[in-house]
Image: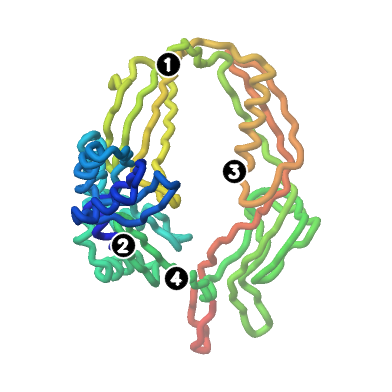
């Protein structure tokens, strides 16, 4: 039988038991009741399939002719409709799912950006937001070719861009321009001087004329590499640059109060939950407004991910408030020493362009309710600093110019 006809009309499998089951088949044929797929089990038992509309007529005829007929579950569309009538919630859910499958792909639910390394993802997202491509936007209004041209125009670092839309997912594929190295030579006339006092340990001259060597003791402001060299009949000007390392010493004094305020947790905690849909925040429960008192705030976000690892712009945000009270505490000498030592070393490291701290001598004492640390740090650091050279021209007696 045609499967399509069987599905729409519905079918039932019958199990017939009787002395002469063949006579019952003859009766069904005489009533023009279609049956097929006949399977003989024994001399008095057989099975066959009929349309669902013939089921009641077959059952009535079986009782008058002394046959036992057992009918199986109805298959096809009539059985499905009967199931839907018995379970209306299932039917409503099915209709809702069908509606959502047809309606939701019209809108943008997730925006993916791929191929960018130098250009930040949020930069591209902000440009897309300006042109209406964001969570909840109508996908029918997206013009891919126009968007590609606008993105490349607004972000010059991109040389190629493609906007692909598939259902509720918009994928932006980009290719960045290669960074062009600066090939221009700096023709500024410069000298290299010492940034501080020290004993030179290493020199690397890339341009200019050497004025120092390893082992020389130099003072702050002393010329290390010159950009001007005078010869017998000429003067050569150049851009002097290089790296000069030297042994240096830094004297740093740091202090901290003997008493300070620290946190004493009260044990009180509050947890607030929020649902973030794109740009909209929905407070679920536990949101009591502005925190009352001093507290630490811990925020955790969990993003919804669709099958296939597609990030969906829906987040569950958990905000935990841990309350504390500020109390006065005393700083002992050992703790103050460690704290001030860390500070002096970090301060010395920040002052260096490149280098390292080799050794330190520290002395701590208490003065006016404060701990005072005097530190002397021995370092090896890069002391070369570029300074421009002002060139003045003057006319000579022979009508030329002299620098």
| Mark linked to residue 165 | 2
342 vs 83, left or right, is right
Residue 23 drawn at (x, y percent): 29, 50
Q: Which residue is mark 4?
A: 177
Residue 92 appears in the figure? no
Q: Which residue is mark 1?
A: 269
The answer to which of marks 3 and 2 sits earlier in the sequence is 2
Judged from the image, the secondary structure of the residue bearing numbered disc 3 is helix
Please name the residue shown 65% across and 74% down the image.
229
Q: Which of 272 and 256 lies nearest the eye of the viewer?
A: 272
Q: Which tag, 3 or 1, sits closer to the chain's start?
A: 1
Of residues 140 and 391, the one drawn nearer to the viewer in this rendering: 140
Residue behind mark 3:
350
> Which residue is found at the position 61% from the left and 32% from the top?
343
Q: Is 155 rendered above or below residue 57? A: below
Quadrant of the image occupied by residue 140:
bottom left
- The answer to whether marks 1 and 4 mark residues whose Cβ atoms lie closer than 8 Å is no
Q: Residues within 10 Å of mark 1 (few under 14, many from 20)?
A: few
Number of the front mark, 1 or 4: 1
Q: Nearer the viewer, mark 3 or mark 2?
A: 2
User: Mark 4 and mark 3: span between their CA atoms?
Assistant: 34 Å
Residue 51 is left or right of residue 242, and the answer is left
Image color mode: rainbow
Residue 179, horizontal then vertical, whole percent: 49, 69
Quarter holding residue 92: top left
Residue 149, position as x, y percentages in the image = 29, 70
Viewer-nearest of discs 4 and 3 = 4
């Amino acid at each position: 039988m045609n499967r399509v006809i069987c599905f729409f009309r519905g079918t039932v499998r019958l199990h017939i038991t009787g002395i002469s089951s063949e006579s019952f088949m003859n009766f069904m044929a005489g009533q023009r009741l279609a049956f097929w797929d006949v399977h003989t089990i024994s001399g008095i038992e057989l099975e066959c399939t009929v349309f669902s509309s013939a089921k009641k007529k077959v059952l009535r005829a079986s009782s008058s002719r002394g046959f036992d007929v057992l009918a199986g579950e109805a298959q096809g569309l009539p059985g499905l409709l009967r199931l839907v009538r018995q379970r209306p919630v299932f039917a409503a859910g099915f209709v809702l799912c069908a509606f959502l499958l047809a309606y939701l792909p019209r809108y943008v639910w997730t925006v993916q950006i791929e191929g960018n390394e130098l250009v930040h993802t949020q930069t591209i997202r902000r440009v897309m937001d300006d042109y209406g491509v964001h969570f909840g936007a109508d996908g029918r209004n997206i013009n891919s070719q126009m968007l590609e041209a606008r993105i490349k125009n607004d972000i010059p670092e991109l040389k190629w861009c493609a906007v692909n839309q598939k259902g509720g997912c918009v994928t932006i594929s980009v290719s960045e321009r290669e960074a062009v190295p600066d090939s221009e030579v700096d023709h500024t006339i410069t000298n290299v001087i010492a940034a501080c006092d020290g004993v030179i340990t290493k020199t690397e001259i890339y341009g200019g004329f050497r004025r120092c060597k390893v082992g020389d003791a130099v003072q702050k402001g002393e010329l290390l590499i010159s950009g001007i060299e005078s010869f017998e009949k000429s003067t050569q000007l150049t851009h002097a640059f290089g790296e000069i390392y030297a042994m240096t010493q830094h004297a740093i004094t740091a202090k901290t109060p003997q008493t300070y305020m620290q946190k004493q947790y009260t044990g009180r905690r509050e947890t607030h939950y929020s649902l973030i849909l794109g740009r909209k925040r929905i407070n679920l429960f536990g949101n009591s407004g502005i925190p009352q008192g001093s507290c630490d705030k811990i925020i955790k976000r969990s993003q919804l991910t669709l099958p296939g690892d597609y990030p969906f712009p829906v987040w569950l945000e958990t905000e935990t408030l841990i309350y504390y009270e500020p109390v006065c505490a005393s700083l002992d000498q050992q703790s103050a020493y460690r704290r001030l030592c860390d500070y002096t070393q970090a301060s010395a490291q920040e002052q260096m362009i490149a280098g390292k701290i080799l050794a330190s001598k520290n002395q701590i004492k208490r003065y006016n309710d404060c701990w005072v640390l005097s530190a002397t740090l021995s370092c090896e650091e890069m002391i070369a600093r570029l300074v421009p050279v002002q060139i003045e021209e003057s006319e000579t007696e022979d009508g030329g110019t002299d620098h």
